Amino acid sequence: MKRTALLIALGIALSAGVAGTASGQALKMNLPFILGGSPNIGAEFTLSQQFTVNADVLWMPYMFKKKEEVLRVLQTSLDFRWYVSPKYYYTNKMFDGFYVGPYAMWGQFNIGFATHDDPNDNRRWRGWAVSAGASVGYKFYLSRRFRLDVNVGIGYAHLQYNVYQLGGEFADYPLAIKDTKWWIGPTKFGVHLVYNLFR
């Protein structure tokens, strides 16, 4: 928990430092997650002509007491964007149009659902994950202040986790320790409603 708080504080400090030198900023939220009831927020800062940095935080805080099911995820991401042919830059100091760039993600998760009739067969996975790759996207102009930002990222994801029994008297005793999985493919997707902050 202390490591999580430290990373969040470091991310806030980094974002504040970037914001101090940026010529334009925007706030955003990922609409599919908002509609699903998962709070999230993002920010994009203009670094120079055609270049921006984007940061996102997602939090799923759900716990269901009836069957001791849990869906808790904290995810952060940072990506750099190069706008190939930026539009509207000189009117709001933020870019629109097509962009590409690298990204990195980090997160913690605690997930378990009652998928079997026998409670002893249900499992919970608790651990962390990292991912890195390349993202592409397009930011559509909606109005003077609002944009729609659609993007997808493809890269490598690595997960490490402990496996527990879901609920019961042995729920806190791991059945497996430091299991790992990896994945190459889509790891990032967003449909963001963007609000431009003018300076």
Image: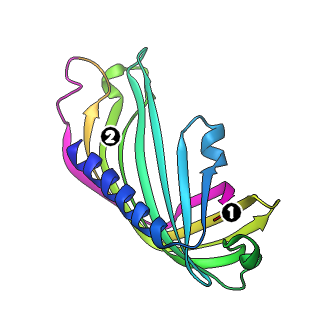
Residue 146 at what x, y percent from top left? Answer: 75, 57
Mark 1 lies on a secondary structure that is strand
Queried whether the magenta region covers residue 119, the answer comes back as no
Tell me the tag on residue 125: 2
| Residue that appears at 42% across and 61% down | 16
Q: With 26 as the anchor, is 40 left or right in this view?
A: left
User: What residue range appears in magenta?
Assistant: 169-197
Q: Which residue is drawn at 20% across and 42% down?
A: 176
Quarter of the picture holding the N terminus: top left
Q: Is residue 94 above or below residue 55?
A: below
Callout count: 2
Measuring from the top left, give residue 3's x and y in whole percent: 22, 49
Magenta segment, prevailing SS (helix, strand or loop): strand
For the residues labelled 1 and 2, the Cα–Cα distance comes to: 30 Å
Mark found first going from the N terminus, 1 or 2: 2
Residue under the image location 33 percent in, 34 percent down: 124
Q: Mark 1 points at which residue?
A: 150
The residue closer to the viewer here, 119 or 70, is 70
Q: Does the magenta stretch include residue 192?
A: yes
Label 2 is placed on what type of residue? Trp
Residue 135 picture quarter: bottom right
- Left or right relative to 105: residue 124: left
Image spot of residue 4 (x, y percent): 28, 48
* Left or right of 151 on screen, residue 85: right
Q: Which image quarter is the C terminus in?
A: bottom right
Indicate the amino acid at tag 1.
Answer: Val
Residue extending farthest to the top is 66
